[in-house]
Amino acid sequence: MTSPRPTPAYRLTPGKGPPVLFLPGYASDMEGAKALALEAWAKSAGRTFVRFDYAGCGQSEGAFDEQTLTGWRDDALAMLDLFGDPAILVGSSMGGWIGLMIARDHPAKVAALVGIAAAADFTDWGFSMEEKMALLQNGRIERASPYSAQPTVFTSRFWQSGEASRMTAAAIAIDCPVRLIQGLRDRDVPAERTMHLIGTITSDDVQAILIKDGDHRLSRDGDIALLIRTIEGL
């Protein structure tokens, strides 16, 4: 029998709705620039907001190497249970993938979705064939990270969970408003992936916001101001 997942560490800013939930990227946590900036905005605007850490990340319990994409999705669903109303999901990179899964499978919980370099299906297109073979043979790989002195670890457990959750080969049945913010200088998530997403999401209320000099993180002051305006527009 599988033991229940521990409650993720989180920070709740109480206010009025619709509530906003920030979904971090892979191996990220709730102390990132975008999460903290959105919390500051929520406090000043009187909006309900939650930032949190997936299991095995940041302040949450659990071993990072034991986590899966669907487990982290379940952590996000647990955070949505804090709200009485449908929430605006703001997902960064992998968090965008998780947001897409939740919006498709739990539409009553989602008022709108904002993806920031949404990395849907990145276990497929984001790994070379050599890396995929190494994951299967060795159970893990490490990559040098441009954002940290420590390498980024990927496990076969996570990779296989992602491969079983791929969603962009067919129509994605999402009917809520969707905004996809994408930097054209993003070296991790190609802009072509965002363009493909637009075509697969069934909602007619889908917009892509392209930033010509934007990178993957989109954490500059101007990027964050655009993100806040996008959320306020929903």
Image (cartoon, helix red, strand yellow):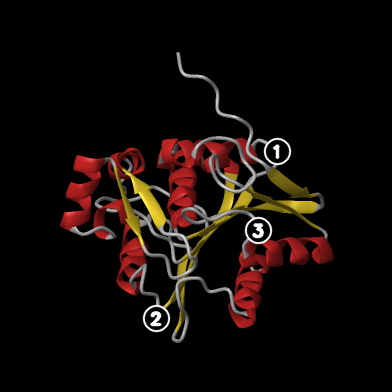
Residue 164 image offset from top left, x and y in percent: 29, 39
| Mark-to-mark CA distance, 3 and 2 | 24 Å
The single residue placed furthest to the bottom in the displayed view is: 213
Q: Are marks 3 and 2 in contact (CB under 8 Å)?
A: no
The single residue placed furthest to the front in the displayed view is: 149
Q: Label 2: state its secondary structure.
A: loop
Which of discs 1 and 2 lies nearer the camera? The answer is 2
Identify residue type, mark 3.
Glu
Asked if residue 25 shows in the view, the reply is: yes
- Report the quarter where the C terminus lies: bottom right
Dot 3 or dot 2: first in sequence order is 3
Residue with the mark numbered 3: 31
Residue 192 image offset from top left, x and y in percent: 30, 71
Asked if residue 234 shows in the view, the reply is: no
| Mark-to-mark CA distance, 1 and 3 | 20 Å
Q: Is residue 209 above or below residue 51?
A: below
Residue with the mark numbered 1: 82
Q: Is residue 79 above or below residue 44?
A: above
